[in-house]
Amino acid sequence: MSPASDRALAPLAWRVRARWLLEATRVGLLAGIAGAVLITLAGRVLVRPEWPTLAISWGVVGLGAAVALALPRWPNRWAVARAADGLGLGERVASALHAERVGHPAAVLVERDAARALEHLDPSAYAVVAQWRGWRLLGALLLLLVGALVVPVPPLGDAAARAADARATAAARTAVRELSAQVSRPPTPEPLAQATAVELRTLDERLARAADAAEAARALEDAQGHLAQLPDAEDYARSRARDQVASAWASQPGFSGLAQALRAGDTQAVRDGLANLGHGAATMTPEQRQQAQLGLQAGANAARDVPSLAGALREAATAANTTEDGQAVTGDALARAAELLAQSAARAADVQTTREAQARLGQTRAALGSASASVGTTAVDGGGTPKGSASGGVADRGNSPGSRQSGAGGDGGSGPSAGASAAGANTGTGSGAGSGGVGGAGAGHGAGAGAGGGPAPGQPGTGAAGLTSASGSGAPASSGPTRYDPVYAPSLLGGEGGPQVQAPGDARGASGQTVDLPNSPKTLGATRPYDQVYGQYETAARESLARQELPQNLQGLVQRYFSAIAPDGGTSSGGR
Amino acid sequence: MAVGDTPAPAIALQEQADALRQRLTAAEHALGEVIVGQAGVVDQVLTALVAAGHVLLEGVPGLGKTLLVRTLGQVTGLGFGRVQFTPDLMPGDITGTEVFDRETGALRFSPGPVFTNLLLADEINRATPRTQSALLEAMQEHTVTAGGRTRPLPEPFFVLATQNPLEMEGTYPLPEAQLDRFLFKVLVPFPSDRELAEIAERTTGIVQIHRRRALEPSDVVAAIELIRSVVLAPHVLGYAVRLVGATHPHRSPVPEVRRFVRYGASPRGVQALVLGAKVRALRAGRWNVAFDDVERVAPPALRHRLLLRFEAAAEGITADDLVDRILRAVSRTAEAGDVLVR
């Protein structure tokens, strides 16, 4: 065609290509929005979290695919010629193009006809929007999409519940991972700490495989039970020894610093303190030496749960009162005692960590139960007491022995507040939480067993339990529903207040004290929570030991006996 | 493009086309002076003539079909021959026979009335199929085979046949093979009241109508050659092809075609569409065929090529109805999404 004809066609060409682009866009938007509507509705009905991403992706892909598929039909010169003919030119332009291409004898004549016709061409007569009906359909689809987004859609079946389960399980797993990270910092070679970390990692894997929140709750419950079984009797013994030695030294002149170091778990400070004591033995006055001996002896008495530690402290006490030549002996004995004390402190810290992990799992289980619809009462029971509100659990325990505090619900409060509230709720006999959170982590059971108003860190023992019977870390934590064992109630019991034990005079010749055991059963065959019974009897025995002079091996026998029958010693932990 | 830029061959073509257009217009007027009304019929007959095609005229008696053909011969200067088809007509009566020449003592071929330029086959459906088929070779090949010899017919050769749609007794419908050889089937409508009045005035008065010659036989031959120079773009040809394809029930997008048509148009249907459209384009002053040209010649080109089922007759569906539906159903654009606006 002639250049003049091409120039005449140029404005029309722009419009033809604009229509092509608009049409491809319209088709793409139709496909994209239609698919997005379906995906949105399906995603909201089935409660699938990924539906926004899918819907947007479909829209983009639909638009792109439509444009890509339209590319082969890009309006070329021929298409523009036909568009011009469509405006009433009687196929002159396209025929001219064809005649020119094939070399037709009449090509010139046809081209001349086309050129004349193009002089009167009005490009604006070519509508860029071919059909508005198609765009109205697009508008309707857009409205449908808006409706699909804002109109409330009831979830199909249990989809909402499953979605809630999935979210709750994911949150539980996040909490377990955070706990696992905390427990693993810093890495420690201690078996208990490593076992705790392994248990948490195993729990994380089980949570990842959990099909629903109920399965996740079972995994948490199992992990709580396993954690409760991890500390053995020796762990508890060393933990108690740490606490008792710290309590004994707190009131001994010259040993308060060591007591603080023990409570803080600063094993290096303990070693340094005892080493300094040994170094200074040669320059002590006889009075100072006697003070040191008494302090060490008090520590030895307090550490009777760990015979090796008690023996080392006793040996150091004996050596401290020897002549100046015994300085080396004193130093060696103190070094052995320091090492054993450090081990006890480390064990106590590990036990603390395990109990705290157990308490945290209980909280996680409680949160899982409240966030999920499928876990139900199990998690509610496992949720138990919220953190710090030991009064709730303790009060329940005090007022209704049969009340359940299943699971590791709540850590029974952190130390002081829990201890105090427990003491207040239980007639002041201090059957509340023990030291710090240990008792609390025991869901109140073990802590409750630690009768005697277990001294929380920084607090002296309260209540009638006295100084050395602080057994805040009495029974280990329990998990799951409380297990009841029938306990024989001695016929001596009767009336209010339970049995009375007449204690002999103490070492300084004071009159004996009458100790009331709280919450004693009033009738034969009545049932009480085992860990309550154990704790109270064990405390009573300890108090007796403190007042009665028994040979050391018998003292050890009594200690070992009560350790053996401790709630976690050989009995089922799952049903506690 | 200015005239000065046009090559000489193109100029010659243009001059030829202009001259032809004028002569055809003059012939149309000349026919119109004799034939009252029937403008469409005259137009279609002239179109078929220039397209070198045969025409079947169908109409009730007395509409001037025979007069039209006879006048056409006078106006175009073409040799005219007439055959009145009767049931006792023999093939030899049309093509010619060999007769014994007493003078030479040998057989001599005596040519029949078919040896002419313009043959009027009047009431062709009255002859037997055997006799009707005698025209098959002549219409297609422009030859006659008789006595073992094939003899060419004069060029140009046209058969303009007439038939009466009313009478069924004593008539023999044309076979499909013969119908297919007619380029157009032209329906001659009953004249209007005004036209009737004029017919009465002309035929019963004293005024004599003189048939003047407007075309020469050479003009007709030249026109037949010239129309082949009209450009047919591929998309227009495709449209014609789709129209013919739509007449076949197994591939038609028209439900009525699938229901009422037994067999559709042959490839001659496409030829008829194209040739007729080219003549229309040239007569309209264009050198290219437009969609409108094809659509205007579609009814006369296709109506006699649709073999209808009995159901069509029972329901009063005619071939024209089906052609009209086909024209409305078949798109001018071949592919979906084409930018061309109808």
Image (spheres, rainbow, N blue to C red):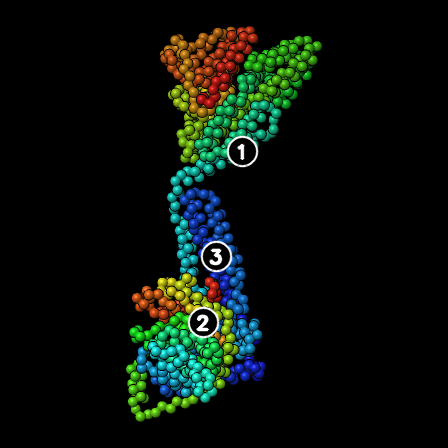
Question: Which of the image's four quarters has the N terminus of chain B?
Answer: bottom right
Q: Given the image, on which type of amino acid does mark 3 rest?
A: Gly
Query: Pointer 3: residues within 10 angstroms few (<14), some, or many (20+)?
Result: many
Residue receiving disc 1: A178
**Amino acid identity at mark 1:** Glu
SS for callout 3: helix
* Disc 1 crowd, CA 10 A, few/some/many (<14, 14-19, 20+): few
From the top left corner, tell me how far across and down residue A65 is, in percent. 51, 55
Nearer to us: label 3 or label 1? 3
The residue at the point 48 percent across, 48 percent down is A54
Q: CA distance from mark 2 to mark 1?
A: 87 Å
> Which residue type does callout 2 highlight?
Arg
- Element carrying mark 2: helix
- Label 3 and label 2 in one chain: no
Does residue A291 appear in the picture of this structure?
no
Residue indicated by mark 3: A28
**Furthest residue in direction right, as rendered:** A325
Q: Secondary structure at mark 1?
A: helix
Task: From the top left corner, tell me how far across and down residue B64 is, in percent.
Answer: 34, 83
Is there any visible trace of residue A315 in the rendered image?
Answer: yes
Q: Are marks 3 and 1 in contact (CB under 8 Å)?
A: no
Q: Label 2 belongs to which residue?
A: B268
Report, in whole angstroms, how far the alpha carbon at label 3 lies from the one at label 1: 47 Å
Image-quadrant location for residue A523: top left
Whether discs 3 and 1 lie on one chain: the answer is yes
Please, which chain is the residue tagged with disc 3 on? Answer: A
Circle 2 crowding by C-alpha within 10 Å: few under 14, some 14–19, many from 20: some
Tag 1 subunit: A
